[in-house]
Amino acid sequence: MATLEIHDLHVTVEADNATKEILRGVDLTVKQGETHAIMGPNGSGKSTLAYSLAGHPKYTVTGGTVTLDGEDVLAMTVDERARAGLFLAMQYPVEIPGVSVSNFLRTSATAVRGEAPKLRTWVKEVKETMQQLQMDPSFAERNVNEGFSGGEKKRHEILQLELLKPRIAILDETDSGLDVDALRVVSEGVNRVRGTGEVGTLLITHYTRILRYIKPDFVHVFAAGRIAESGGAELADKLEEEGYESYVKGGA
Ligand code: ADP
Ligand code: MG
Ligand code: MG
């Protein structure tokens, strides 16, 4: 069973010629089959956690460990992390001019699986998944994220998630900027993946509304660069009522 273990993770970024510590001792274990929600105020370091796990060069790990089934994730290149089964859906997905969605998906699948997917079954799989996400077939010929609406970007992230079948998926604010219909379609995609029981999901969000569609097994409150409190789904209800004020004011 795949297990992602984060222990005492410290991360800094360079900003305005100064080194700023953003993550200050994150401890978290995500197992295959589990869904964890990370919730917290803006600027608390949620995206920094996601980028650090994905190996973004802007973020420097200054302490702690991250392992996937005991393997040192921090020693892996970005590609190696993807092959090991880590997947990140970014809060702000980047445009890739000149690369079609169709080519991008096939190249990604080839990189992750170590061999090109068989064309016949692959085309069918892509088509069916796009249908489920209510994406027009012509979408496959567009350039990645170029001129995509907020909802299209998020559907495209979930399309990747469903096709690449990672072992641990990190979804950073997949709910932001979605109307109710898009939120439902995107949530159904996440729930399909979850239903396989083969993926551990880390759902990062600022708002509780996506948790009406995707019921987390665990909820963690993120404040000032670390997990301030952990609980079950009921913790999200408490946050819905009380907000993050007590965590921000009280300090960590
Ligand atoms: P969240 O996702 O919880 O809103 P972020 O991880 O995006 O928080 O940001 C946490 C803090 O780190 C913020 O103060 C932000 O300005 C800073 N930060 C994050 N990434 C960078 C970066 N690449 N360069 C400079 N500062 C950054
Ligand atoms: Mg933010
Ligand atoms: Mg963020």
Image (cartoon, rainbow, N blue to C red):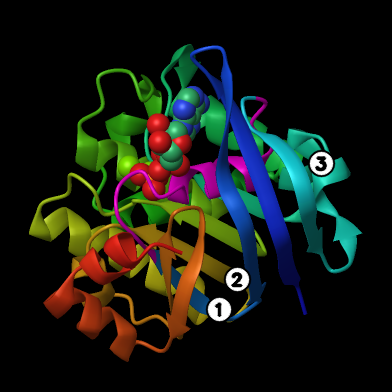
In this rendering, does residue 90 appear at all?
no
* Tag 2 near tag 1, CB within 8 Å: yes
Residue 112 in the image: state x and y as whole percent. Answer: 73, 44
Q: Quadrant of residue 145?
A: top left
N-term mark: 1 or 3: 3
Disc 1 versus disc 3: nearer the observer: 3
Which label number is shown at residue 80?
A: 3
Q: Quadrant of residue 2?
A: bottom right
42 or 130: nearer the viewer: 42
Q: Let me know if residue 43 is in the magenta part.
A: yes
Query: Looking at the picture, how far across and down is residue 63, in whole percent?
Result: 77, 48
Among the two numbered marks 2 and 3 on one chain, the one whose residue lies closer to the N terminus = 3
Q: Residue at x 36, y 43 (%)?
A: 43
Q: Which residue is mark 2?
A: 199
**Ligand 3, what quadrant?**
top left
Q: Amino acid at mark 2?
A: Val
Where does the magenta region start and end? 39-57
Residue drawn 36% across the image and 49% down it: 130
Q: Secondary structure at mark 1?
A: loop
Name the residue at the front extreme.
250
- Crowding at label 3, few (<14), some or many (≥20) Cα neighbours within 10 Å? some
Q: Secondary structure at mark 3?
A: helix
Q: Is 198 situated above or below 15? A: below
Label 1, on which residue?
196
Question: What amino acid does circle 1 point to?
Answer: Thr
Nearest the viewer among 175 and 167 is 175
Q: Secondary structure at mark 2?
A: loop
